[in-house]
Amino acid sequence: MERSYASSSSGDMASLSGTGTRSVRIIPLQHPSPEKAAGPPTAPLVERVTARLRGMSGEEWLSALLPCSRWMRSYRWREYLQADLMAGATVGVMLVPQAMSYAKLAGLHPIYGLYTGFVPVFIYSIFGSSRQLAVGPVALVSLLVSNVLGTIVDSSDELYTQLAILLALMVGVLEALMGLLRLGWLLRFISHSVISGFTTASAIVIGLSQIKYFLGYEITRSSKIIPLITSIIQGIHDFSWPPFVMGSSFLAILLIMKHLGKSGKSFRYLRAAGPLTAVVLGTLLVKIFHPSSITVVGEIPQGLPSFSIPRGFEHAKSLISTAVLITGVAILESVGIAKALAAKNGYELDSNQELFGLGVANICGAFFSAYPSTGSFSRSAVNHESGARTGLSGITMGVIMGCALLFLTPLFTDIPQCALAAIVISAVIGLVDYEEAIFLWKVDKKDFLLWVITSVTTLFFGIEIGVLVGVGFSLAFVIHESANPHVAVLGRLPGTTIYRNILQYPEAYTYNGIVVVRIDAPIYFANISYIKDRLREYELNASSAHRGPDVARIYFVILEMSPVTHIDSSAVQALKDLNQEYRARGIQIAIANPNRQVHFLLSKSGLIDLIGKEWYFVRVHDAVQVCLQHVQNVTSKKSGSSSNETIRKRQSGYLQSLLKQDSVPELPPMLEPLLHENIV
């Protein structure tokens, strides 16, 4: 049945009457029956997962187990093959010198960088879901490895290498478990500001740690900026000009080639050729002039890595926190760039499959003497710019790395250390994200503060503390936003039946005696107290362009609940208390447009019956019309007006109860006399 009330709105289904008013149809809200409120029976999680697995076809099973089968089935040989081979060769040439550089940054022999760029690359091409991501050693993970293992054992000790390989196994297991358990959503709680601040500070620390190869003397190994700067200043009397001039020259060449490579498509190969150019030039200079003050890489074993089981498990407990940290950093770096590349190339990326692929790559790499690897920003960007279309480009990278291990390692003996340091510094300069800080300052001061806190704590207190503090503040901001949701007073836009925030639309007007409030968040135990405080505040301080009958207090509070996606038992109990509090002051709650789940919960909790089924509405405008009718009747009663004797007689019982402070108004009969146009 439809309820008819009065309105002057042109948007309602209405008919004009002879008195200048119009009739409004109130759409009835369908309340759930007790059976429906209980909801459909939900199958146990295990049964649902089992049913889903049984319903998968053979092709779906193959895609899930071997993501590479997706691009293999639709591979266009004539269109893709040349592009994949060229991109893979380009990035492979770039990877060889970078792998040795990052291994030195990790405190390992350069050969372990080559091993890390070999097996994991092949494995990821099979199990990874991204078609452009370039996996291998990266600067940030290398710094984390060096920072942690350096406090346990000296880098010259064999145990140091064993622990680095064990760390790859632990990181791989964590990543694979996160992928299998579909826990990729946990990373959403880490703000982009935290990631940007952390990588910026880490890039500065990495750059300072490589300065020793430019200066010609050793400096303290640390992830904090103060010890690094102090050590650099204290050892300045040992400064040597030849490595400084050579390293600075290589760095300038790398930066120029990188800039030219980004400036246009015709020069894009210069960006990838930069590291190789520095290595070749440095090797030629050493072979020709034999400078005694220039340190070189030294002998590198020739041949592919052999299968071996990781050792050092007795130290695994002390590596757990580091493994978790490296896993988080590696995932954020890999999944972020992989998603961006997937969007640019028009295919879907499964974050959980990506985690599993990275995990398997690290697990298999650990059995072939690799330390933790992940996706690289710089190499992935070059791979994409070079036209990579599928995972075949990754396989090509692995082939080039295998050829380097088999045939080229004797040529790497005379590579100057300052050339490898220049490669690392040129790579991390791009991670100093000062542009992000400027953007955040202009757009959101809170996110800028988060960026500053993370970067400063990382610089002065170390990487682990920086990550923990950054993530802690990020979660604190999330909790604060959740516990203090946006609550708005709504007003009616002139000439419409639309209700909007009166702060955003000052022209919207409200009605005397009625407050319409919209809650823009789920209601649960953490934010219900804040919401109740805001409701009391709006009840006392409701302000806008008022219309309607002239009354001195609030009689109705209408809750617009369409944005409320969830409500818990604590919030239901708080609403019951609020309803009782309002009843004591003669105020009626009305609820508009609750969603299905919220409606069911309100029904099961008895709150619908407590407030009254007649006070639930489909639209805010329906609720306002009904409440406005009651407020008009109260005004007529107080003024003793006899102009509408019919209303007074039909509402006499209702008005008597409304004027009592210890009672709640009852809904009048379904058909009411019409309000005059100047009231609504």
Image: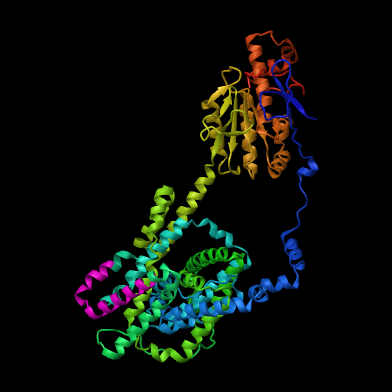
From the viewer's perspective, tell me whether residue 244 is left or right of residue 40: left
Q: Nearer the viewer, residue 469 or 281?
A: 281
Q: Is residue 674 above or below residue 40?
A: above
Q: Quadrant of residue 124?
A: bottom right
Q: Main secondary structure of the magenta part?
A: helix
| Residue occupying the far left of the picture | 237
**Residue positioned 29% across, 76% down in the render:** 249
Q: Is residue 148 left or right of residue 227?
A: right
Q: Depth check: give the residue in front, 505 or 561.
A: 505
Q: Nearer the viewer, residue 393 or 512?
A: 393
Residue 301 visible in the displayed image: no
Query: Residue 92: in sight, yes or no?
Result: yes
Q: Image check: 289 left or right of 594?
A: left
Quarter where residue 277 is shown: bottom left
Q: In the image, what residue occupies the spot 65% across and 39% down?
A: 572
Residue at image x 48%, y 78%? 90
Position of residue 479 measured from the top left corner of the image (x, y, whole percent): 51, 48
**Is 156 drawn above or below residue 653 in the view shown?**
below
Q: Position of residue 516 (x, y in %)?
A: 60, 31
Question: Measured from the top left, where is residue 502 in percent x and y?
Answer: 54, 32
Quadrant where the C terminus lies? top right
Magenta run includes residue 444: no
User: At 63% across and 79% down in the image, what residue appears?
Assistant: 77
Residue span colored magenta: 229-258
